[in-house]
Amino acid sequence: MLRAAPSGAFFMRGPALTEPDMVIDATRPYDENNVFARILRGELPCRKVHEDEHVLAFHDINPMAPVHILVIPKGAYVSWDDFSERGSEAEIAALVRAVGKIARDQGLVAPGYRLLANVGLAGGQEVPHLHVHIFGGGPLGPMLARR
Ligand code: AMP
């Protein structure tokens, strides 16, 4: 659900730590049945934005900003931690290049945008397949809600 702050800025849903049932332990082995693995296998649909040999990107099903795109590696990596340790140079370069290209293609560079990769329990990660969020299309508000 997209929510607009009184200032007109778009911002994240409530702190992830208030939803402990939904977050995942990023130290667990890769779960082949996670929702993004199913999208990669074509078992579930997505609104594709970009695809190349190593990367798929699609619109988030529950956008938190006017533009909210998820960029994922095609390989089976739980999180940024897993990917940065086991990913090949080609996979890592492809993901980084794809994030930049998608942001440019979406016209997000001049107005500005935000990248986010949640990792594990404290990070509020819900889907146990690495994904980089691209947020844009309007003011995004503060980086994190102050406690
Ligand atoms: P995170 O909390 O960083 O793990 O974010 C997971 C994101 O995946 C959330 O923003 C969800 O809205 C999004 N999501 C979950 N299922 C789908 C789906 N089938 N297609 C697109 N986005 C999804």
Image (cartoon, rainbow, N blue to C red):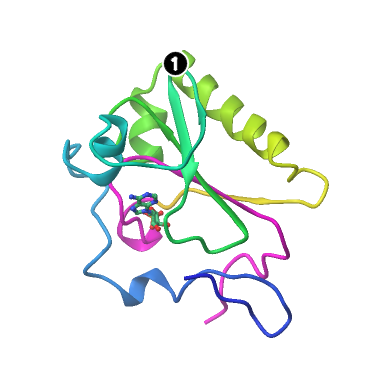
112 or 88, which lies in front?
112
Q: Could you say where residue 94 lies in the image, as x and y percent from the top left?
A: 52, 21
The answer to which image quadrant residue 41 occupies is top left
User: Amino acid type of disc 1?
Assistant: Glu
Magenta stretch? 119-147
Q: Is residue 22 above or below residue 128?
A: below
Q: Which residue is mark 1?
A: 53
Q: Is residue 110 above or below residue 64?
A: above
In the image, is residue 91 part of the stretch drawn in magenta?
no
- How many numbered tags mark residues here? 1
Which residue is drawn at the image coordinates 60% and 25% (left, top)? 97
In the image, is residue 141 part of the stretch drawn in magenta?
yes
Q: Is residue 117 left or right of residue 122?
A: right
Q: Could you say where residue 74 lies in the image, as x and y percent from the top left?
A: 36, 26
Q: Is residue 67 left or right of residue 76?
A: right
Q: Name the outermost residue toward the bottom.
A: 6
Q: Secondary structure at mark 1?
A: loop
Q: Is residue 27 left or right of residue 12?
A: left
51 or 15, which lies in front?
51
Which residue is drawn at the image coordinates 57% and 78% (left, top)? 146
Which residue is drawn at the image coordinates 40% and 59% (left, top)? 123
Q: Could you say where residue 102 lies in the image, as x and y percent from the top left?
A: 63, 35
The answer to which image quadrant residue 72 occupies is top left
Report the predominant secondary structure element of the magenta stretch.
Answer: loop
Q: Could you say where residue 107 lies in the image, as x and y percent from the top left?
A: 75, 42
Ligand 1 neighbours mark 1 (CB distance < 8 Å): no
